[in-house]
Image (cartoon, grey):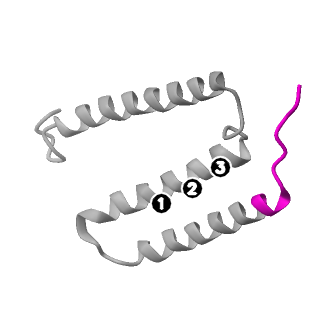
């Protein structure tokens, strides 16, 4: 079974990119973008998670079955988020009305 070998240069570039994205996350946290704070933070976090998943977990060069399981994990995560948000957004608020 032959495995794809990723060069050390790629790992270093991905690591530097992750460090830069972390610095961007810290920098963005100090700005008040209003309602855009959460989408910006989640976008940066998603980019970092994808880099780790694709390169450090070797999903980029793996077989299709691995991609199926990764996709199933993301679909399951989305289901959990949708149900959590549907519960949270339909509550009465913090005053105790819905309890």
SS category of the residue bearing label 1 = helix
Q: Is residue 50 magenta?
A: no
Task: Provide residue 43's location: percent of width, then percent of height.
Answer: 42, 56
**Residue name at image x 48 percent, y 32 percent:** 74
Task: Provide residue 79's location: percent of width, then percent of height.
Answer: 37, 27
Label 2, label 1: how far apart the Cα atoms are = 6 Å
Tell me which segment is drawn in magenta: 1-11
Q: Nearer the viewer, residue 2 or 86?
A: 2
Q: Earlier in the sequence, mark 3 or mark 1?
A: 1
Label ID, residue 44? 1
Q: Nearer the viewer, residue 20 or 33?
A: 20
Q: Is residue 98 above or below residue 40?
A: above
Q: Please tell me in which quadrant of the rendered image residue 11 appears.
A: bottom right
Q: Give the position of the N terminus as an image quadrant.
A: top right
Check if mark 3's residue and mark 2's residue have beta carbons within 8 Å: yes
SS category of the residue bearing label 3 = helix
**Residue name at image x 44 percent, y 28 percent:** 75
The residue carrying mark 2 is 48
Label 3, label 2: how far apart the Cα atoms are = 6 Å
The residue carrying mark 3 is 52
Specify few, some or many for label 2: CA neighbours under 10 Å numbering under 14, 14-19, or 20 or more: some
Q: Please tell me in which quadrant of the rendered image residue 62 appears.
A: top right
Instruction: Determine the main secondary structure of the stretch shown in magenta.
Output: loop
SS category of the residue bearing label 2 = helix
């Amino acid at each position: 079974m032959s495995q794809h070998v990723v060069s050390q240069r790629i790992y270093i570039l991905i690591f530097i990119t992750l460090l830069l994205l972390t610095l961007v996350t810290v920098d963005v946290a100090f700005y008040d973008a209003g309602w855009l704070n959460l989408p910006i933070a989640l976008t940066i976090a998603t980019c970092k998670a994808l880099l780790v998943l694709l390169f450090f977990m070797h999903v980029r060069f793996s077989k299709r079955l691995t991609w199926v399981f990764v996709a199933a994990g993301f679909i399951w995560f989305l289901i959990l988020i949708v149900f959590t948000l549907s519960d949270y957004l339909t509550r009465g608020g913090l005053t105790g009305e819905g309890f």
